[in-house]
Amino acid sequence: MVYTSQQWQGEYQETQTGLPMLLDPGLLRAARQIYHNYYEVHPHLTQRPMGVAIDRFTYRGKLIFRAKPILLPQESFVPLSQLEAEIY
């Protein structure tokens, strides 16, 4: 799922119809790469991030360690559950 700064409602976000928002596969791939790179560079750190804030246009992002992220208008939040989920 993707969260934007105006749409954040806590644990998860749904569209007006009550269905979960679909995540752009490229955005999810970039967020997973950012998350993976963090753990390759810092394997000894034990603090788990809440997710990744990622720019929808440039795919540049940063790990978020707070429960309620503050995002720029062009950023989306990808929660940790989406980063660790494997699609078969």
Image (cartoon, rainbow, N blue to C red):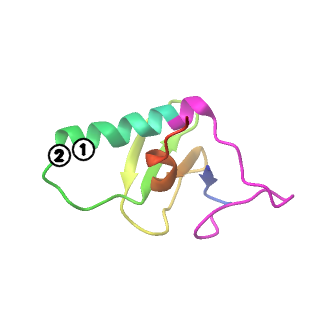
Identified at 49% across, 68% down, the residue is: 68
- Label 1 Cα crowd, 10 Å radius (few <14 / some 14-19 / many 20+): few
Name the outermost residue toward the front. 88
Mark 2 touching mark 1, by CB under 8 A? Answer: yes
User: Which region of the structure is painted magenta?
Assistant: 8-28
Q: Is residue 75 left or right of residue 50?
A: right
Whether residue 21 is in magenta: the answer is yes
Establish if 88 lies above or below 47.
above
> Magenta: predominant secondary structure element?
loop
The three-letter amino acid code for the residue at tag 2 is His
The three-letter amino acid code for the residue at tag 1 is Tyr
Identified at 87% across, 58% down, the residue is: 17
Residue of label 1: 39
Name the outermost residue toward the left. 44
Whether residue 49 is in magenta: the answer is no
Establish if 33 lies above or below 64.
above
User: Residue 61 at what x, y percent from top left?
Assistant: 42, 41
Residue of label 2: 42
Q: Is residue 40 left or right of residue 20?
A: left
User: Residue 45 at what x, y percent from top left?
Assistant: 17, 55
Given residues 11 and 67, the one toward you in this image is: 11
Identified at 18% across, 39% down, the residue is: 41
User: Residue 30 at what x, y percent from top left?
Assistant: 46, 33
